Amino acid sequence: LLVGGLAAWWLSRQLAALRRYADAVARGERAQLPDAAGEFADLGCALESMRRQLEGKQYVEQYVHALTHELKSPLAAIRGAAELLEGPLPEADRTRFVASIGAQSRRMAGLVDRMLALAALEHREALDAPVPVDLAALAGDALEDAASRAAARGVTLRLHAAPGLPPLVGDAFLLRQLLANLIDNAIDFSPPGATVDVRAEAGPDGLVLAVDDAGPGIPAFALARVFERFYSLPRPDGGTRGSGLGLNFAAEIAKLHGGRVALANRDGGGTRARAVFPAR
């Protein structure tokens, strides 16, 4: 009876681990294949192989549709400018159309680069070599990187770092990319003379990186869609829309670290972006 009970417990434990893995995959979560032995290990490998093949087919289909849709606009602009350049034009118009071709080609290159980075990130199931990251130092470095862009738009950057913050275990490069995307977004939507506040602090849910801007806020119809791939809002100054990948990229980085990103309108005006990570 004792041997039979132990065998039944072991079998139940192996099956339960595989079931939890299958349930997590069905919910779209990043899940690691559980350790198993014997036939259960073979079954787990078969499930993992099936998941990768199914995800790969769906993933490629989605990305091909998305990329072709987003490339239509810059390609149409380049084609139109090239057709106009074939005929006689005043020098000022010729210069303007040549500059437009250059700008649109850079836009396409940036879009492809961001898509490749996002594709690589979405296929990662876990961090390779997480290390303790000082959030205050990371926020300071991200502000330094964004200083010239903020100055060009007449926006002031300000850092508020709580003393004695525990380190966040993660990938320093990816976390810096996350914060850089949130800061860039805040700069784009802030009017000249405004201040963008970046905060590193500890909250009830864990460690927090927050970015406050003084822009017009997010319209109610867009609140549920701001993290969708390729969804972007027009800039207040009438500038070109963004690629719509920055916030999606930030959300994927947070998810890889076990956290989340949220955007909300502030009571006094503007928007607050918060990236929350569980404290460890």
Image (spheres, rainbow, N blue to C red):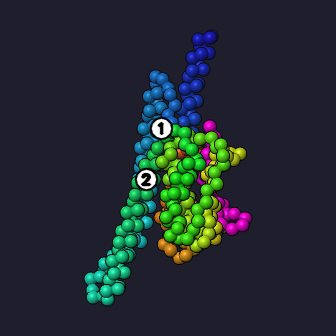
The magenta span reads 261-280
Q: Which mark is residue 196?
A: none
> Does 3 appear above or below 84?
above
Q: Main secondary structure of the magenta part?
A: strand
Instruction: Look at the picture and state if 266 lies above or below 51.
Output: below
Closer to the chain start, of discs 2 and 1, is 2
Query: Which amino acid, by three-letter code, is at mark 2?
Result: Ala
Q: Is residue 180 found inside the magenta-colored segment of the image?
A: no
Quarter placement of the N terminus: top right
- The numbered dot on residue 117 is 2
User: Of circles 2 and 1, which is in front?
Assistant: 1
Please, what secondary structure does the residue beneath circle 2 have?
A: helix
Q: Is residue 165 visible?
A: yes
**In the image, what residue occupies the spot 62% across and 11% down?**
2
Q: In terms of secondary structure, where does tag 1 sit?
A: loop
Q: Which residue is mark 1?
A: 129
